[in-house]
Image (cartoon, grey):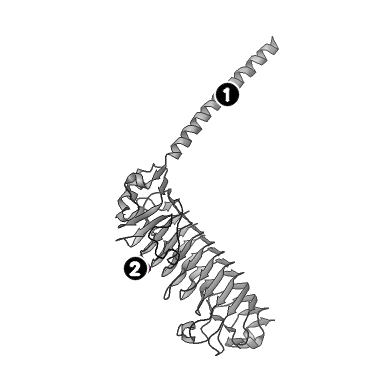
């Protein structure tokens, strides 16, 4: 009798588990189906990708139609004109194209279609995608991927591709191409933002970021135009800039102003001009990079009308560390040009740097308290002040 009762209890328990499991499966399927319905196709809201019809109203309608938990606006193949910005003012919105299509003006000469990708072209609008906080404290969980944003034609460069205005966190921008824009991406007050695998070139300026913490720019192809700054970082803390190719033709490849504790590593920098990298800040790490100052058309062009002591790298700040990097300088000038110019600050250290050209007696032009380890001999160092207050070990 006892065995029978135990068997009965076990049977009831198993039946309960089975019933509960069926309910869990049903609920899971309901949630999955509901989430899947949050992929909204832009053309279902009236957008026409012919490059002539304004699609900003369709974007607004699609974003408004998303459920409270957010969703995805899918941009199909086509050229979608914007006479007004695409405004994202709510959390957890993704704009995803099928692919970014052709990327360079050079690649599609005499071709009128967008190369099979999802293209957003600025018409009467000066901004492609505008991210603002709306009625919420700060905006979160926005993702932009697999689209090309163009300001128009090379002769009509204008506007900003993606403009992030207010406090934000967790924004992702991936596989985005920006061309023919004044600024590719502009971000203010970003926290934990990631810009990855983007091609932001043939723009006057590639990336502007102000007042941010814990952001990442990685694996990107970046190139500005004459008079522009490729990457301009202001008041950034704990930022990682890694694995990027930064090439001509901006006046400055990378500029840091008021930046602390940032990691600039494993990048390839190329430029025709001095001032390739300008740093103003404290406790930044610059390591494992390749710097190539390429042969320019003339001395005045290479020096940007500065003097030969301006420096390829310019440093203002305290306890910045440069290490394990190589410098190739194809100098046009023969007037003892400066590669590293340390202007002000204390405790800046340069360690294990390789220089292809050591004919100048001013490879380093530094201020007092600078430390130089295993880079060049003292004959290649000029000190602004007392030589005895600069440590050189070679």
Front residue of 236 and 155: 155
Say the numbered circle drawn on residue 18: 1
Question: Up-down: is 388 above or below 313?
Answer: below
Q: Are marks 2 and 1 in contact (CB under 8 Å)?
A: no
Residues in magenta?
154-158
Q: Nearer the viewer, mark 2 or mark 1?
A: 2
Name the residue beneath numbered marker 2. Answer: 156
Disc 2 from disc 1: Cα separation: 66 Å
* Residue 319 can be seen, yes or no: no
**Which residue in the rendered view is the most extreme toward the front?**
110
Q: With 156 as the anchor, is 239 left or right in this view?
A: right
Q: With 110 as the anchor, is 368 left or right in this view?
A: right
Q: Determine crowd level at label 2: few under 14, some 14-19, many 20+ residues with C-alpha closer than 10 A.
A: few
Front residue of 149 and 10: 149
Front residue of 252 and 278: 252
Examine the image and state in which quarter residue 371 appears. bottom right
């Amino acid at each position: 009798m006892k065995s029978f009762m135990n068997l009965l209890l076990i049977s009831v328990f198993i039946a309960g588990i089975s019933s509960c499991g069926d309910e869990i499966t049903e609920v899971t399927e309901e949630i999955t189906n509901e989430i899947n319905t949050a992929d909204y196709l832009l053309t279902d809201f009236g957008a026409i990708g012919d490059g002539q019809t304004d699609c900003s109203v369709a974007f607004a309608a699609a974003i408004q139609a998303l459920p409270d938990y957010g969703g995805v606006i899918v941009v199909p193949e086509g050229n979608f004109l914007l006479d007004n910005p695409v405004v994202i003012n709510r959390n957890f919105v993704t704009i995803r194209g099928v692919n970014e299509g052709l990327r360079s003006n050079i690649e599609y000469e005499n071709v009128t279609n967008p190369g099979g990708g999802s293209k957003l072209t600025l018409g009467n609008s000066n901004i492609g995608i505008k991210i603002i906080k709306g009625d919420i404290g700060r905006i979160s969980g926005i993702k932009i991927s697999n689209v090309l944003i163009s300001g128009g034609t090379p002769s009509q460069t204008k506007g900003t591709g993606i403009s992030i205005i207010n406090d934000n966190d967790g924004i992702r921008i991936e596989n985005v191409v920006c061309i023919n824009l004044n600024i590719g991406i502009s971000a203010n007050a970003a926290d934990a933002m990631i810009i990855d695998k983007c091609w932001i070139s043939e723009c006057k300026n590639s990336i502007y970021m102000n007042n941010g913490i814990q952001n990442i720019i990685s694996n990107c192809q970046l190139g500005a135009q004459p008079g522009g700054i490729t990457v301009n970082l202001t008041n950034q803390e704990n930022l990682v800039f890694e694995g990027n190719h930064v090439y001509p033709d901006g006046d400055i490849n990378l500029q840091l102003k008021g930046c602390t504790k940032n990691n600039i590593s494993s990048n390839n920098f190329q430029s025709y001009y001095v001032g390739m990298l300008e740093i103003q800040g404290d406790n930044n790490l610059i390591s494992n990079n390749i710097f190539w100052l390429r042969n320019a058309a003339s001395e005045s062009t290479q020096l940007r009308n500065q003097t030969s002591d301006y420096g390829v790298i310019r440093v203002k700040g305290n306890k910045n560390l440069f290490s394990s990097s190589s410098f190739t300088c194809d100098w046009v000038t023969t007037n003892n040009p400066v590669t590293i110019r340390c202007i002000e600050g204390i405790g800046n250290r340069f360690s294990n740097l390789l220089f292809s050209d050591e004919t100048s007696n001013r490879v380093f032009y530094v201020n007092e308290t600078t430390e130089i380890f295993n880079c060049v001999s003292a004959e290649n160092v000029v000190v602004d002040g007392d030589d005895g207050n600069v440590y050189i070990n070679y």
